[in-house]
Image: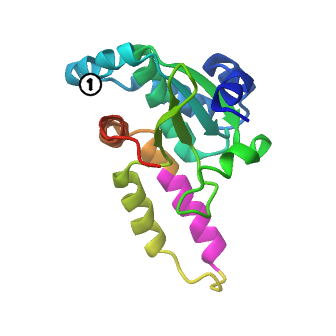
Amino acid sequence: MHLNDWFQKGMTYEQYVDSMNVNRDRMLEIYDNVQLSEEDHSFFRQAQTRNWRVIVLTADWCGDAMLCIPILKRIAESAHFDLRMLIRDENLELMDQYLTNGKSRSIPIFIFIDEAGMEKAVWGPRSPYVQQMIEQMRSQLPDNDDPLFEEKQRQMYREFKDRISSDPSIWKTVIDSIRARLTQPLTS
């Protein structure tokens, strides 16, 4: 399937929000509170001339999507990017073309396309800072065979979600990471 076809298949941001059962309130809270700096607004307003659109691979249970999608929505408003959301597990044919490290179906994935449906940039699933943060938190977990592993892992993910949903400095790392990706030439 062509990327334009995937885009047409997707839900609008509003339809996606309406369909959410998990993380909706936290995602909307991030959206309400995230701010683009004047410098960021200026950068993303310049992107308007590209007439790009964005295919978003996501799922409402995903904490990283909860963090990144409202930030992308703010960026899209500034850049006039049209967004379409595709649920990861319902679109594995596309998801499997954008595996993290060639093996993981990590989300969200943002696929920036031009009017002809040509891929121009891909971002996701995390900013480097957030990736480093989660790796550091995981390194504190007991071994997988430890009886406390599952409990400690659940606690770690709760703390991770609390932190990423409330810390504007983390939100800024996502903005900066997306911005950096959009300044890089496409590499296939």
Secondary structure, mark 1, is: helix
Q: Quadrant of residue 166?
A: top left
Give the residue at x 30% y 36%: 183
Q: Is residue 153 magenta?
A: yes
Q: Nearer the viewer, residue 131 or 21?
A: 131
Q: Position of residue 169 (x, y in %)?
A: 29, 40
Q: Is residue 175 magenta?
A: no
Relative side of 54 to 94, left or right: left
Give the residue at x 67% y 40%: 59
Q: Nearer the viewer, residue 127 or 169?
A: 127
Position of 182 relative to 93 (above/below): above
Relative side of 151 to 138, left or right: right
Q: Position of residue 40 (x, y in %)?
A: 26, 25
On the image, numbered disc 1 is attached to which residue? 40
Q: Main secondary structure of the magenta part?
A: helix
Amino acid tagged 1: Asp
Q: Position of residue 164 (x, y in %)?
A: 44, 45
Q: Quadrant of residue 118?
A: top right
Quadrant of the image for the N terminus? Answer: top right
Q: Residue furthest left?
A: 39
User: Does any portion of residue 32 appear in the rendered image?
Assistant: no
Q: Nearer the viewer, residue 81 or 151?
A: 81
Give the residue at x 48% y 37%: 68
Give the residue at x 35% y 35%: 182
Q: Which residues are magenta?
A: 148-160
Position of 63 relative to 35 (above/below): below
User: Does any portion of residue 117 appear in the rendered image?
Assistant: yes
